[in-house]
Image (cartoon, rainbow, N blue to C red):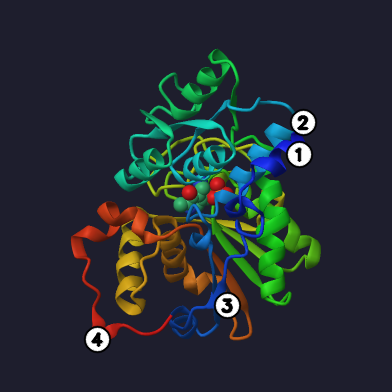
Amino acid sequence: MSSKRYILKRRKDILTRDFIGNTPIRRCHYLSSQYNTNIFIKEEFHNPGMSSKDRPALFMIEEAIRNGKIKPGGTFVEASSGNTGYGLAMIAREMGYTSKIFVSKSCSLEKVEILKSVGAEVEICDNSNGLHDFYSTQFKAQSYAANNTNSYFTNQYYNSSNIKAHYRTTAPEIWNQMKGEVTHFIAGIGTGGTISGVGRFFKEKNINVKIWGVEPIGSILSHFLAHGTLPEEYKTLEPIEGIGRTFIPGSLDINSVDKIFQIGILDSESAAQEYKNKTGFLAGFSSAAIIATLKKHINDLALKPTDSIVLLFPDHGSRYLSKLYSKSNIVNEKSKINC
Ligand code: PMP
């Protein structure tokens, strides 16, 4: 059977491209009125694996099968903070493959449990010495795939299907939903796939759209974008799950990005609490980092009342109950407004 026919045969309804993607976008009244502009949120937690990473997971899996990199029944291997791992494990299982996911020990308990629940074999690793260290997720995933027959390392940091997934699905969806009226796009940067794919597509449509990234303090991408070099001194990377890098990923197209803002973990935590109290909505950690960035840098952003700013929320706060919300999980009903 040809690989294309195999993909089509194995795909169940849940895995069609109609089901992954086509997530809603909505105007956030709270943030729009707070900053006197028009702020929209692309809600990626409506994907079946509850994150934006279902998109690259599907593209990477299909590309590997199509090009004969893995045979039926093989094992997909990935190094992931959880969301790519979950998308990959879910899709792999549906298509008759197994998965082995290497996660960092900073990964939330919820994500590890969710991974196991879709049948992934999970190995916890130590990324404190960087992703090229012998004990890191990236290193272990690579060596596992090299030493186990019929296993394939999707390698999201260097896989061109990562950018392609967002260029072909996330970006045109947003563009159509907004009827081309987008002045700014803001996303957190982890592998860089989202911002690169969306940024590239938007710039082709309208070179004036501003593409802004968000990374935690200690990440090096804002320095690289501003100076074209790596920083001489490295700070400790503040752990905001899913974003922040101490190397330049191959899946980041820096030419598609206009500016990268840094934000701290404390600002992100308090933005998550404030947003929850005002809207009743639990933002994911990296989504809260975007909200915090707006608040912290608002005076430099020069947003106008006619602007249309799209924030990409990759996942939902329910994945971070223990890390973000369990300390104060009572919504202040009096200050709650619609969002
Ligand atoms: N936020 C979260 C929660 C993520 O899981 C990821 C993916 N690592 C990102 C943001 C960043 O997306 P990307 O890898 O496409 O840059």
In 3D space, how far apart are the residues under numbered discs 2 and 3 (Cα atoms)? 55 Å
| Residue where numbered disc 3 is placed | 303
Q: Secondary structure at mark 2?
A: loop
Q: Residue at x 43, y 80 (%)?
A: 339
Q: Is tag 4's residue or tag 1's residue first in the polypeptide sequence?
A: 1
Q: Is residue 272 above or below residue 71?
A: below
**Quarter where residue 325 is shown:** bottom left
Q: Residue at x 50, y 43 (%)?
A: 90
Q: Is residue 324 above or below residue 305?
A: above
Q: Amino acid at mark 3?
A: Leu
Of tags 2 and 4, the one toward the viewer is: 2
Q: Is tag 3's residue or tag 1's residue first in the polypeptide sequence?
A: 1
| Mark 3 beta carbon near ligand 1 (under 8 Å) | no
Q: Is tag 2's residue or tag 3's residue first in the polypeptide sequence?
A: 2
Q: Secondary structure at mark 1?
A: helix
Q: Amino acid at mark 2?
A: Met
| Residue where numbered disc 2 is placed | 1
| Residue where numbered disc 4 is placed | 334
> Relative to 19, is 93 on the left or the right?
left
Q: Amino acid at mark 4?
A: Lys
In 3D space, how far apart are the residues under numbered discs 3 and 4 (Cα atoms)? 29 Å
CB atoms at circles 1 and 2 under 8 Å apart?
yes
Q: Is residue 123 above or below residue 162?
A: above
**Quarter where residue 278 is shown:** bottom left
- Residue 5's tag is 1
CB atoms at circles 3 and 4 under 8 Å apart?
no
> Relative to 173, is 23 on the left or the right?
left
Q: Is residue 259 in view?
A: yes
Where residue 288 sits in the image (x, y, percent)?
Answer: 40, 62
| Mark 1 beta carbon near ligand 1 (under 8 Å) | no
